[in-house]
Image (cartoon, helix red, strand yellow):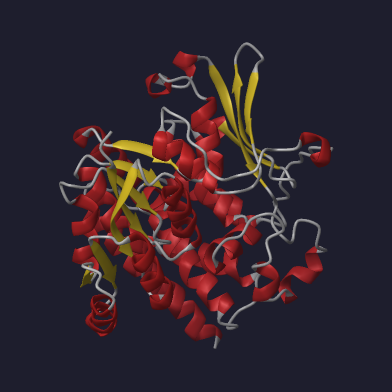
Amino acid sequence: MSRAWITVLGATGSIGVSTLDVVARHADRYAVFALTGHSQMAVLEAQCRQHDPLFAVVADAAQAEPLQQRLQATGLQTRVLHGVEALAEVAADQRVDVVMAAIVGAAGLSPTLAAVRAGKRVLLANKEALVMSGALFMQAVRNSGAQLLPIDSEHNAIFQCMPRNYANGLGQVGVRRILLTASGGPFRDFALEDLAGVTPAQACAHPNWSMGQKISVDSASMMNKGLELIEACWLFDARPEQVEVVVHPQSVVHSLVDYVDGSVLAQLGNPDMRTPIAHALAWPERIDSGVSALDLLSTARLDFQAPDPQRFPCLWLARQAFDAGGTACAVLNAANEVAVQAFLDGRIGFTDIPVIIEYTLNCLPPVQVEELAQVMLADRQAREHAHRWLANRA
């Protein structure tokens, strides 16, 4: 069997690292075509030494030149490229079979879309790409014949519980609703009056998952779940009212699908991203992911509860943005990225995050999207308005 060539966009992040762990377990099946990284050059260099990709892509020439010299000094033939265009090139190259789209935030949209338009098997870990440009993105999938497989543990769980013909419409395949689980993050039991004073370190201390800072803060605010709700609507052609968010602190049930006959199918597993990664890499086959078997006896109990709208206003802002349509979700995402970074930098409090997002949404009424340029314009304008809020606050 010939090996499949894989490009990992965002190789130095937690998803990229987990992807390469699974790939290394199956060197007979997969070969690394390209690895990309933005700032963690030491990690990227070590990954290149281990996986010997044809290409590595970094942000700029200042990073590329020394990395190229160090790799050449060790005898590696990896060619180091830089810039946004290079990201799209290694995603769309005709030799590539699989693209892991794991660049966090809006920066991942362009290369992920390039992979889709090139008809690749795209493993989608970058939810923001679909949130920002849902209709255009899914149309590109249909036009190119690309295979789009979700990597978020929740969406991958839904995919596993859905019938193969779910694209015909949920009602046509007997699905009543999707139950999207959420851990509730580190603040699910905090007193509401204490949330204003929480620190970035507290927000990033997720009780169940090991994730990057931005995603960890999104989980703490449940904006992560709001973005996932939007993503689920696009992936599974669902209406927002067909997607119910359920807080499940143990993170063992990754999501559920409720059928009209009363059956509820769930996907369970230990909270380890290598499970959905291995599933999507090999689908429709199954391969070893390196994840230990789930011990239900030690888990002992599974709890579920409704999310508190006072504690998690970001979740409702995401629902409102999807209902508004057009560029509203791109505005939501951009404002959130600015707000989260400001919180991580110590410029605002945790409870200011939804305030900035709501302010920005109110400043920019949604515009119907017909081309990608409108999405990128909305993203830029939203960032400007969010930064203006920060400047006025200062």
* Residue 241, picture quadrant: top right
Relative vertical location of residue 289 with respect to residue 386 in this rendering, above or below: above
Residue in the foreground of this view, choosing between 389 and 253: 253
Give the residue at x 20% y 36%. 144
Quarter of the image with the C terminus in it: bottom right
Q: Position of residue 75 (x, y in %)?
A: 24, 73
Give the residue at x 51% y 74%. 341
In the image, taking residue 88 as reference, residue 171 lies left or right, namely right
Q: Note whether residue 234 is visible.
A: no
The residue lying furthest to the top in this view is 261
Residue in the foreground of this view, choosing between 32 and 201: 32
Relative vertical location of residue 56 with respect to residue 9 in this rendering, above or below: below
Residue in the foreground of this view, choosing between 37 and 178: 37
Q: Position of residue 6 (x, y in %)?
A: 30, 49
Q: Note whether residue 206 is visible.
A: yes
* Residue 149, picture quadrant: top left
Give the residue at x 50% y 24%. 162
* Residue 363, picture quadrant: bottom left
The residue lying furthest to the left in this view is 94
Quarter of the image with the N terminus in it: top left
Please give the count of numbered marks on the rendered protein. Answer: 0
In the image, taking residue 150 as reference, residue 53 lies left or right, namely left
Give the residue at x 51% y 41%. 276
Relative vertical location of residue 260 with respect to residue 11 in this rendering, above or below: above
Q: Position of residue 263 (x, y in %)?
A: 65, 16
The residue lying furthest to the bottom in this view is 394
